[in-house]
Amino acid sequence: MTENSKLAEIGVVGLAVMGSNLARNFAHKGHTVAVYNRSFSKTQALMDNHGSEGTFIPSETIEEFVASLEKPRRAIIMVQAGPATDAVINQLADAMEEGDIIIDGGNSLYTDTIRREKEIAERGLNFVGAGISGGEEGALNGPAIMPGGPAKSWEALGPLLESIAANVDGTPCVTHIGPDGAGHFVKMVHNGIEYADMQVIGEAYQLLRYGAGMTPAEISETFKTWNEGDLDSYLIEITAEVLSQVDAETGKPLIDVIVDAAGQKGTGRWTVKAALDLGIPVTGIGEAVFARALSGASAQRAATVGNLPSGELTTLESLGVDKATFVEDVRRALYASKLVAYAQGFDEIKAGSAEYNWGVDPRDLATIWRGGCIIRAKFLNRIREAYDTNPDVESLLLDPYFKGELEGLVDSWRRVVIAATQIGQPIPVFASSLSYYDSLRAERLPAALIQGQRDFFGAHTYKRVDKEGTFHTLWSGDRTEIEA
Ligand code: 6PG
């Protein structure tokens, strides 16, 4: 750094693709950006390849990096979640001064963020756990950003983050989500919804391909059409792209040469674990996480494929199902299942926010998720309207607009679940979401029987529908009922 050079408004630590793209995004917006990476070669590569895109201040040591930042210093960490993040936080905290802000932009577990915020606050610094969505392209051209942490750091950070975030109708896709772990919690649930959304798209593909016998190219066209309606979203758009891709080596559709075992880095699993602790049924997300696990259970699949009785299967043709009707039914089943996944995700956010006193406003999420992030979709406008109309709605499914939509979807949804079962194709999220929906609608659930069983074997007691109190039947005695 020369003596005359200006100090940087923001710094980025960790210059793998996400970090360097974020640094470039800040630079493109006219900010001076300090950059640092543990091995200087990455910093050098950024400077060589993109140094002319804006004003960067590269550093070889973390102390030099911190010294190149204007006060209050703001440094975004873009390194692997877990111990690597802790190590960098500590190095930064050692070199920083009171009032400086450390931002963790990785996919950190929200409980780690809560711990780190406390530790850093004790050292007089501010810590902001910020979820950043949009992948490599989003980091470069406009991600959705979900910062948590103390409200006062938002004052120093907000304008900077707003300048690089995606923008929908003049509204930047970033806002302060809530204290400590709120930002990372919300990003975690975003990813859980992303898992469910990808799985329902996958189930639709499975049915069109192996049920309706369509080619990947034909299905790609179908998804393109779907992307012009209610399902208009980034994930549907890229699905059409993936399905139209032809493998250069074999000339086959690329989809047919990709191994059908889905990876996962952990955020979907965390969403389900947190939901279990909060007691929120995120069945769509759960089934999506398990579907990925099953796809990767290669030894088990090698042993079971072609080796388990299927029962008598039929075809859509023998069922007399018209192809065009089936395709439309599948679209509607996808839409309905997607609605359930979002409703469940928002339920989890509501419960998490109540548990940790975060005061998360669901309208903010529906607003900032409209652009930049992986689950961006036209339909988030409707979710925002739903929460605008009634911020306390018991389930998004009850919102008058979505209720109206469900009216038009539910018959198709049932037909698809029945047909898929008859032709023997797996649809874990379509089917479990329909069961969830029917559970919500059911006047009586078998939970009464479960209470009876629990009382039988463990004297766990039950409540009665017709009077107050807690009761127990003397099952091993004369079977009279006593008040417990
Ligand atoms: C995003 C993505 C991003 C990433 C996830 C998905 O919002 O930009 O969710 O965070 O792609 O890590 O991870 P897995 O599918 O590998 O779990």
Image: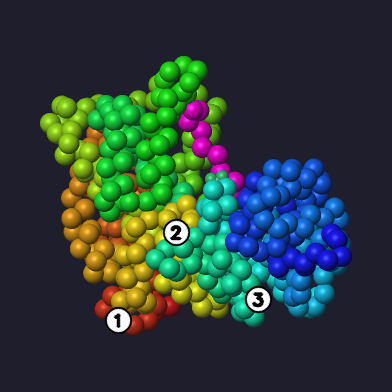
Compare residues 77 and 185 and report the one nearer the observer. Answer: 77
Residue 454 visible to the viewer: no
Specify the quadrant that holds the C terminus: bottom left
Would residue 16 appear left or right of 247 to someone viewing this image? right
Q: Residue at x 83, y 66 (%)?
A: 4
Give, as a single range, the part of the protein colored magenta: 258-267
Give the main secondary structure of the magenta stretch: loop
Asked which quadrant contains residue 176, the reply is bottom right
Which amino acid type is marked by label 3? Ala
Residue 359 visible to the viewer: yes
Would residue 117 appear left or right of 142 to someone viewing this image? right
Give the residue at mark 2. Answer: 371
Label 1 SS: loop
Q: Residue at x 71, y 49 (%)?
A: 51
Asked which quadrant contains residue 390, the reply is bottom left
Residue closest to the far front: 4
Would residue 416 appear left or right of 177 to someone viewing this image? left
Q: Which of pointers 1 and 2 lies earlier in the amino acid sequence?
A: 2
Q: Residue at x 39, y 66 (%)?
A: 169
Q: Is mark 3 within 8 Å of ligand 1?
A: no
Q: Residues within 10 Å of mark 3 (few under 14, many from 20)?
A: some
Give the residue at mark 3. Answer: 156
Q: Residue at x 72, y 46 (%)?
A: 46
Label 2 SS: loop
